[in-house]
Structures are given as structure tokens and as C-alpha cells.
Image (cartoon, helix red, strand yellow):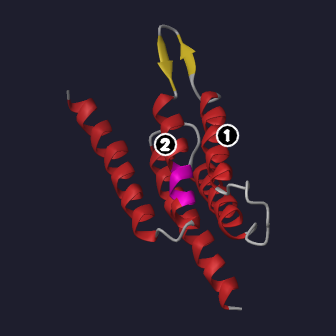
Amino acid sequence: MLLFFEYLLQILLSAFLGGLIGYERESSGKQAGARTMAILAVGSTAFTIISRLGFQDVSNASFDPSRIAATIVMGIGFLGAGLIFQKENRVEGLTTAAALWASASIGMAVGCKMYELATIVTIVLLFILWFLRKAKKEL
């Protein structure tokens, strides 16, 4: 039963932190809002927990659970590429694609019980997304 609550905490924390990043994107009128980022972070957390704990009984010495983490990074890169497009003479969606990719790292950190790291990454991302957007508008 204790394991259930630990998983619940991890999933809820990743949904909250990913949702914060998505909320910032959504409030900026960008694609991939709170629901998308929260789902992405939750999925990354689940896959990380599975890769960390789900294969402990595998006796194959050549098994490397970090391969699942590497696959998450590649898969999110593929999703992010779908957000990038050219509109007139400029490219749009780069920041949202990068935020999507970084949100996956939040989920992975939570899945590895690196709660402080996940929180720090969220705070830094929000600072970058919010502060630099405000600074750019003032220039």
C-alpha cells in the first residue's frame, strides 16, 4: 500500500510541475498547453518508474534500463519536431517544442525520485519562459 501512495505522489507531482510549464505556454497563446505538458510529464514519470523498477527481475546481464530513458528523449524530440513550423518568413514553435522536451525531463526526474531536481528545473523553466518573454517584449 505504501508503494501505491509513493507512485501516486510521483504522478501527481509530475502532473503539477508539467502543468505549470504548460500553463505558461497556454497563457502565452502557444501550442502544447497545460494538459499536454502534464500528460507528457506523467507519461515520462511512468516510463521512468517502469524502467527503474519494472525489470529488476530480469536476469539478462545485457539489459540496460537507461535505454528506456534514452527512448523517451528521442520520442519527445519527435513530438517536438511536429510543433515547429514555418510561417511566412519565420520559424515558430521552437520554444514550445523545447519546453515539451524539458517537461519530459521533469517527469523523468520525478520517476527517479529526484524531486528537488524536478522542482528546480520547473522553476528555472518558468523563469526562462516568463522572464525572457517579458524582456524580449520590452526590447
Circle 2 SS class: helix
Region in magenta: 103-108
Residue 23 is situated, as x and y percent measured from the top left of the image, at 49, 52
Residue wearing tag 2: 99
Residue 28's image quarter? top left
Q: Amino acid at mark 1?
A: Gly
Quadrant in the picture for the C terminus: top left
Mark closer to the observer (1, 2):
1
Query: Residue at left 50%, top 23%?
Result: 92
Q: Residue furthest bottom?
A: 1
Query: Residue at left 57%, top 46%?
Result: 33
How far is the residue under mark 1 from the one under mark 2? Answer: 14 Å
Q: Residues within 10 Å of mark 1 (few under 14, many from 20)?
A: some
Q: Nearer the viewer, residue 66 or 59?
A: 59
Residue 66's image quarter? bottom right
**Residue 30 located within the stretch drawn in magenta:** no
Q: Is residue 33 visible?
A: yes
Residue 67 horizontal side relative to residue 23, left or right = right
Residue wearing tag 1: 75
Decide which of tag 1 and tag 2 comes sooner along the chain: 1
Q: Is residue 31 above or below residue 41?
A: above
Say the numbered circle drawn on residue 130.
none
Residue 26 is situated, as x and y percent measured from the top left of the image, at 51, 45
Magenta residues, dominant SS class? helix
Q: Nearer the viewer, residue 77 or 122?
A: 77
Circle 1 SS class: helix
